[in-house]
Amino acid sequence: MTDAAHRLLWTVVALLLVAVGVTALAAGSGALPGGHPDGVLLGGGLVDTWRLATPWSTLAAAVAGLLTAVAGQRLLHRALRRPDRALRGTLSRPGRHPGRTRLATEVLVRALERDLLRVPGVHRARVVLTGTPPRPDVWIRVDLTGDARPAGVREHVHDAVRRFATTAGCQPAHLDVTARIGPARP
């Protein structure tokens, strides 16, 4: 999941929680139509139904709470994780003639980082390769100076990834690029 998708997901979760909180506040203060500040929030029929299904209603509430907690934990874990399973060792590709070409992944990562640092305005570059060697996932973070041209940086990153794919002999299965812009120079 990309950074934008994570931000959208967290925004939706936050808006839902705010909506639930505002609704509870409005119901408690009697601001809802037909509501009274001293009235019961849950009607007598709902309470009677809850009591009728006594062992199962409690179990259903516990399961719903557990599923919500697990979903929240997974969401937090995915949002706070670093790219996992970084490739280590060598990237081995069969050649046209007998034999194999072996490339150390650290060498590929450093070469791509150096290639990304050649563009004006890129202050720092970090690359992580994950996944399986024939179609690795490529995670790139570039720190830009305040006067960098985003269009030029985007074009250079595209070209650098294309050169990386040609050199390594494999296409990235997933490409995630994060650009952070620093303050402008005085």
Image (cartoon, helix red, strand yellow):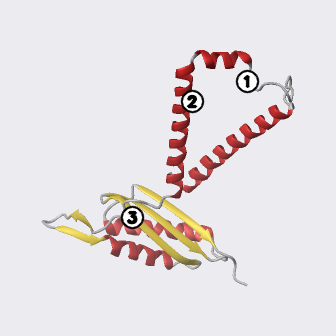
Question: Residue 30 placed where, x, y %?
Answer: 86, 30
Label 2: which secondary element:
helix
Above or below, 174 relative to 180: above
Question: Residue 42 placed where, x, y %?
Answer: 73, 24
Quickly name the residue at label 1: 42
Q: Quadrant of residue 103?
A: bottom left
Above or below, 141 relative to 40: below
Mark drawn on residue 61:
2
Is 79 in front, or is 123? 79
Is 68 in front, or is 114? 68
Question: Residue 33 placed where, x, y %?
Answer: 86, 25
Whether residue 88 sits left or right of residue 184 in the image: it is left
Q: Amino acid at mark 2?
A: Ala
Label 1: which secondary element:
loop
Q: Residue at x 56, y 56 (%)?
A: 3
Whether residue 175 sits left or right of residue 30 in the image: it is left
Mark drawn on residue 129:
3
